[in-house]
Image: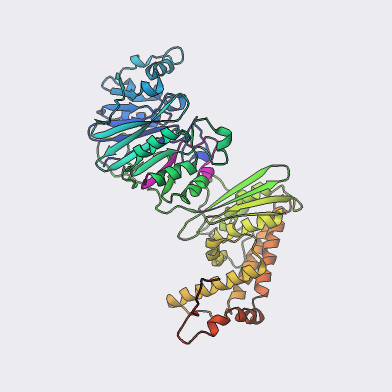
Amino acid sequence: MEQFVIHGARGSYPVHGDPYRRYGGSTSCFSFETGQGLLVIDAGTGITALGHALYERDELPPITILLTHVHLDHIVGLPSFKPLLRKDAHVTFLSSAKILGDWRRSLTTVIGQPIWPVDLAKFGAAIRFEELPDKPFTRYGVTLSHCEVLHPQGCVSYRLDTSNGSLVIATDREHGNGAMDRRFMDWCRGAATLIHDAQYTPEEYPARRGWGHSTWEDSARVAETVKAQRLLLTSHDPNKSDDAIDLLTERAKRLFPNTSGAREEMAVLPDGSDAARKPAGTSKERIVAVVPEPERQPLTFHYTFTFDDGQAKRFTISLNPDTLELIPAKRDAFPNWTALTHCQCSNCPLNNDREMRCPAAVGLIDLVDTFGRSLSTEQVSVSIETEARNYTKRALLPEAVSSLIGILMVTSGCPVMAKLRPMVRFHLPFATLDETRFRVISMYLLAQYFAEKHGKAPDWDLKELPKLYEEIHAVNLEFFKRLSEMEIEDANLNAIVRLDTFGQSVSFTIDSQLLEDLDRVFESYLSAPQGSSTPTTSAGGA
């Protein structure tokens, strides 16, 4: 099946390392192969891996490389594109001198002496240079057209119209030129998939105006205006980690819900749907293990702690949207204090034969490492970004950290703490005691509804709820012991103490007197006519 594959989605320069593994660190390169040939858009460092795979084929397809422009990050991968070394290779370069000037000279200057030891013309492949025609044309069964976009020294965006849908790729585009923007919008209309530059946030853009890149907000508004079916954000800022890209993607989804960040080796169909990735290195069909992009994006919470000296610590919590379980970070090693048998809770149902690590401890590794040298007396400004709204508060560090510890422990996979996990779906940082009591009781009663629905005896009288908090108290005590054995300052320890004290307060005040007080709040339900669940009103709700 014909599919569009992303080989590199970083802008400006390549990056590598753990913070960039999910979205990749290679610069701009994309491909689309049909039975007639291979279209490649841009030749950043992402083209290297594509070239290695193609080089292994017995027969190479004809290759056309469409260049958006000749800035270094878009052509730097060409010297390592191995098909250029094969004498049976036929490679055509296409771009626009009207928009870019003498792009051929720029290309052969970079890939030639003295910058590169071998001139492009001497690589071995049969190489041609062609100018983009003004009107749409057909190559390898795909109708291609282009549009000039705003970028220093010029830039070309490409549109691929195929039998399975249309796709637009605009790697480096800045908004702000009215006439050019209108032409671009008109040209994009009808395309199912829009791959668009989103290097900056709206907050960053004013200081970078004129640099030739867009924001996630502009990308989302373009997709909405041209009625695209799917938006892929590209040209990721090399200074942004995967977590940072997750954050701006989530923000973009509020404007255009079907938004994703472009990832290396991601394959999509022109109609906007995901495709199973087929290796470029073989022309024969074979079954491959494919992990498609999740249909539902993780539920994320972003915590930022800013200290008085200006230093900021940031945490992104990603949860499975269906189970609300924490999506753990990939680790090569774990500290000894995370072993299940190290201060294992007396009420822990886990067996060491099956579980080597305490789930709650594993979930808190980064937090413990970050605040291990912090004191309880330190003041911080904490901001929390959720799916629905943002929260900010000035607080002592233990209070600020306890909110984060709570959500991490509850979602970690600890079978005791998991009983509180449903409340995470509508996370309410820094809730008051009254707010928490109301939320806990509401959650617990909803749990009894589902218990009865599944054939279990419900606890409508809330008799077992205090016992649940006794179990949670036992976990907090043992976890305090676990951390106490480490050589750390008291901020993390006092955050656990505060969290536990708050939990005990919730449990202590869930009694008959509290329920009688709440009874009055529900008077309208109690006075409703028999058989009616809600009173009739003449106006909107509260």
Q: In the rendered structure, does residue 240 fall within the stretch colored magenta?
A: yes
Q: Position of residue 100 (x, y in %)?
A: 40, 22
Question: Which quadrant would the N terminus be assigned to in this image?
Answer: top left
**Residue that sits furthest to the right in the current view:** 377
Q: Quadrant of residue 159?
A: top left
The correct choice, above or below, for 186 with respect to 66 in the image is: below
Task: Give the quarter of the image for residue 492.
Answer: bottom right
> Is residue 97 visible to the viewer in this orientation of the structure?
yes
Instruction: Say left or right for 49 vs 210.
Output: left
Give residue 45's position: percent from left, percent from top.
43, 29
Task: Give the total of numbered labels.
Answer: 0
Vertically, is 510 above or below 288?
below
Q: What range is drawn magenta here?
A: 226-245
87 sits to left or right of 19: left
Does the segment drawn in magenta span residue 103? Answer: no
Residue nearest the viewer, comparing 287 with 310: 310
Residue 98 to residue 280: above or below: above
Choose between 164 and 111: the one closer to the eye. 164
The image quadrant that residue 58 belongs to is: top left
Quarter of the picture holding the C terminus = bottom right
Q: Position of residue 14 (x, y in %)?
A: 49, 31
